[in-house]
Image (cartoon, rainbow, N blue to C red):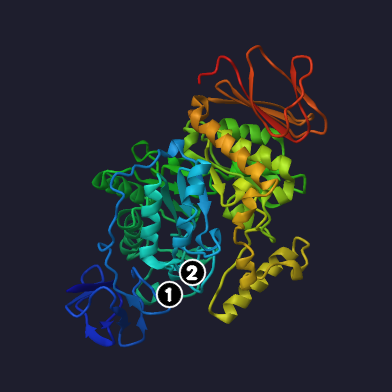
Amino acid sequence: MHRFDVWAPFAVQMAARVAGADHAMFGPDDQGWWFIDLEAAHPGTDYGFVIDGDTCYPDPRSSWQPNGVNGLSRVYDQAAFQWTDAAFRPTSLSAAIIYELHIGTFTPGGTLDAAIEKLDLLVDLGTTHLELMPVASFAGEFGWGYDGAALFAVHEPYGGPDALKRFVNAAHAKGLAVLLDVVYNHFGPEGNYTGKFGPYLTNSHRTPWGGAVNLEDAWSPQVRRFFCDNALMWMRDFHIDGLRIDAVHALIDRSETHLLEQLARETEALSSVLARPLVLIAESNLNYPRIVTPCNAGGFGINAQWNDDFHHALFAVLDQGPHVGYFADFGKLRHLAKSLEKTFVLDGIYSRYRRRSHGRSAEHLSQHRFLGYIQNHDQVGNPANGNRLEQIVGADRARIASAMVLLAPFVPMLFQGEEWASSSPFQYFADHENPYLARSVSNGRKKEFAGFGWDPKAIPDPADRKTFEGSKLNWNERTHPGHAEMLDWYRWLIRLRRTTHALNNGEPGNTTVSFDEAAGWLCMERGGIKAICNLGMSDYLFPLREGDQLLLYSRLDPPMRDAALVLAPDTIAVLKSSSAPS
């Protein structure tokens, strides 16, 4: 016996098409739900829903779309998988080393099972958490995953639902937690049939993708239930250890309880039931501390959020090119220093990019509530050519960047291949099945970058499979000169962070920064650990105190002169004072 149910509040009649036969459903109830119990259905049975005698559509809550988002749904048994991870407990988020990866380009095979083969290398690196870019089913074979259409199903080219469970189980066996990127601010433009069933979107608000998700208008409780149930499913049925929620600033919700707070409270309850910790991480460009303030203190209760201000401040001092777009608010060492000490640069001050004041101070919050990074899928992939940091600023400055990320007070996050200075770009790619949509995306991207002076012919075509294939990591590089040295550098930095008390203190006021804007040097001090970088044009002599111990230097052993450490241009050194706790 299997129950089929679907939310369709405006339908006059509903039928479940199961194994080719239509069965009239009962309903709707006062919440708009229809249902039917059928003995003939079992795991592996294909089905869909017929609305008012019209076309048969896949289930908006389908757990399995073996033939893509436009095909029929298939009954899936969530309880059939044999888990072996009962004893696993993740490293706390405050002590995490997060590694973001895209399943399709992480390995040549581009599947979840192929990714399992690389887990030992990530353990050796010192990684504690893997953050998967979205795996919810989307149209076509390849894409970034942010245009998900069947949000409860795992993208079939990645291996489908069982493959995700195998991946999580294998990661847990090696001590790695798994975080999953989810998109709740819009649906993909292709293969999304939710609008056929009910008012999942509203025109009361507009977003870059069109009508906003309906979080506060009529029938919104069931839309909110859709997203909360989706989140709980990943953490309960797939043993995911936490979620990264995409672009929460596009969730327009003026309800008494914001969707994020509802999700945080339900996640906390699930964590208690499962007896294992679960975390939520937000992406937000609002610089709004309430997002990561606990619910009982009047906040939304999200555990942490990405800190773009730190990225922008660090990148803008490393890159000497013109600072356009959101980088217009950055570019000075004082911006980087402010971010390191107070988290947000734009904390209520005027933003030249936005032409208004932006943000609010977060200096009262633990800096472990924020993720720090110099590369991620957006910052690498959104520019026209998808170049990596080393290709933009050079190897020396890339080493400075990695040291600042891994020694900063934020929870560090790396992007796939960053640790060995991968030469593979990460470009924007999207395999839309609709030819008109594919052309529109390609032409739109060319038009966008033509405004920045790019030759349209030089813009990689998102629909071209070569763009996707060219973004795959080349794991053989890891042992090549230059790449191997960078990999060792990352290993040293991660080991230092994970074994040094001062570098694991995220409380406000733990980090102090001094700098000389004209000379180009900056010193970050965290409880006796000092990271000194020289981005100037001349050598910088850093005076040493008695007992200072040099831990790391980004080139060969640095020369000493008159009881001072000589930092050549584009180098960084890490020291430990004799008074610092071990």
Instruction: State whether residue 289 is above or below residue 381.
Output: above
Residue ranking furthest to the right: 538
At x 20%, y 73%, the residue is: 2
Quadrant housing the N terminus: bottom left
Query: Does the rendering let one see residue 348?
Result: no
In front: 299, or 465? Answer: 465
Residue at left offset 49%, top offset 29% = 499
Q: Where 193 falls versus 567 (above or below)?
A: below
For the residues labelled 1 and 2, say whether their Cβ atoms are less than 8 Å apart.
Answer: yes
What type is the residue that disc 2 sits on? Answer: Gly
Answer with left or right where residue 496 lies relative to residue 46: right
Horizontal relation, residue 155 to residue 445: left or right: left
251 relative to 336, above or below: below
> Which residue sits furthest top?
546
Local secondary structure at mark 2: loop
Q: Which residue is mark 2?
A: 188
| Separation of marks 1 and 2 at Cα, in angstroms | 10 Å
Instruction: Name the kind of residue labelled 1 in the image.
Output: Val
Residue located beneath label 1 in the image: 69
Which mark, residue 323? none
The x and y percentages for residue 456 are: 75, 69
Residue at the spot 62% in from the left edge and 69% down from the top edge: 462
Position of residue 62 measured from the top left corner of the image (x, y, whole percent): 34, 70
Q: Nearer the viewer, mark 1 or mark 2?
A: 1
Among numbered discs 1 and 2, the one appearing first in the sequence: 1
Q: Which element carries disc 1, helix, strand or loop? A: loop
Image-quadrant location for residue 423 = bottom right
Q: Residues within 10 Å of mark 1 (few under 14, many from 20)?
A: many
Q: Is residue 573 left or right of residue 23?
A: right
